[in-house]
Every structure is written in C-alpha cells, then in structure tokens.
Image (tube, grey):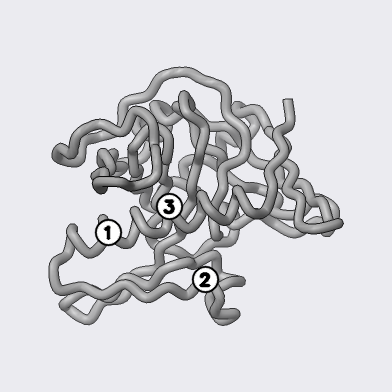
Amino acid sequence: MARSFSMRGVQGAADRAVQHARAWLLETEPGSRVHDVQEDPRFQHRGVDLLWELPSGEVRGIEVKGDRNATRRRYFFELVSNLEKDTPGCFLYSGADLLVYVFLSQGELHVLPMRATREWFLPRAKEYPLKHAFTQTGAIRYTTVGAVVSVRDVAEGVPGVLRVPLKRKAGAEAEAGAPAPEAPSPVAGGKDEAGGPDGPG
C-alpha cells in the first residue's frame, strides 16, 4: 500500500533527523564541525546533506534520512526519487560516506556505511519488495519508489552498522518510545511494515 506525505510534514521530520544526526556526529568526535549543505547545489546532486569535518582535517559526507513510522524495523532505500521525471534515488547515486537513518518515533539513529551497504544491496535488490510513496508540494504530486529492507538483514550483511538510542531533550517534540541513552550497539531487527521515509537527501 502506497503512503502519502505532505511537504510540511516531510520537512519537519527531515529537520529533526538532521538535528539528531548533527548531535551524534559532534558527540562522537569532540572538536569536529558539521556543515549543513542541504541547500548547496554542489552537494545536492551528490546526495550529501552534511559535511563532517574531523579534527584531523578529514571531511566525510553524510546523507540523512528521517523515518516517522512508529513500529518499523525496515529501511526504505530510495531507488527512484521522482517517478514522473524518472530521476534516480539518492541511495543509488549518493557520494556520502555514511547514511544516518533516524527512526524518529522509535528513538533510534542507525549509522550505515554507504558504499558497503549499496554494494551489499544491489546483488540482492530483487529479494526486497518495492514501495511507492507520494509527496504533495502545492499542486505538484510526485512519486518516490524505494526498496523495503530488513534492518536485521543489513546488520548481518554489512560490517560496521551501528544503532544509537536518541537522547531526549526536556520539552522536546514527542517521539514516542524513545529509550534512555546507552552505548551504540550493532543493529538487531524485527518485522514490520514500511513506507517511504522523510529525509533531506
């Protein structure tokens, strides 16, 4: 079943996801800096939302996806960003080093090495169902197509995937079920329905 999203709701979730990703990056590497390049045309076509400048001088590209589904244990890997215009999805072309996938309602942030995840997925693409998600922007409605992929499958197939519980701020927006902070751990999966996520990339 396809799902529909308003641009306002999508952007709100995307903004929250970016905030969580930024906070995690800065905490992981004290002294690092994070640059938001979502609106920079030099990076939009590369599928990079944030630049993570490490204290060593190394710069890593980060793609961020936000997902509002309360029970999902699956990723939505975007394969076609706009079906009507036949444009490829950011999962296929992103030049990011890391995909930070934020399950907002579940209170979890997952960190996936982008290239390794893509290389693992492509030979198995036909094993996973496709979902259509519709986004309304004013009078324009467009369709995004993505593969629904089990969190557990990715964790078992791709080395280096992390799951990090989100830290909740007092008075922050309600993100039901967010657990208390703890150390990052390898992802463990379950089964649930999935539609399209909300993300800047």
* Up-down relation of residue 152 to residue 47 (above or below): above
Name the amino acid, label 3. Ala
Tell me residue 155's x, y (percent).
Answer: 35, 33
The residue under the point 38% across, 57% down is: 98
Q: Nearer the viewer, residue 134 or 186?
A: 134
Name the amino acid, label 1. Ala
User: Which residue bears the numbered disc 2?
Assistant: 38
Disc 2, SS: loop
How far apart marks 1 and 2 lie (CA) works out to 17 Å
How far apart marks 1 and 3 lie (CA) works out to 10 Å
Q: Quadrant of the C terminus?
A: bottom right
User: Which residue bears the numbered disc 3?
Assistant: 17
* Up-down relation of residue 148 to residue 141 (above or below): above
**Quarter of the image where one finds residue 178:** top left
User: Which residue bears the numbered disc 1?
Assistant: 23
How far apart marks 3 and 2 lie (CA) works out to 13 Å
Q: Is residue 97 visible?
A: yes
Q: Quadrant of the N terminus?
A: top right
Disc 1, SS: helix
Q: Residues within 10 Å of mark 1 (few under 14, many from 20)?
A: some
Q: Nearer the viewer, residue 1 or 93?
A: 1
Q: Nearer the viewer, residue 83 or 135?
A: 135
* Up-down relation of residue 124 to residue 56 (above or below): above
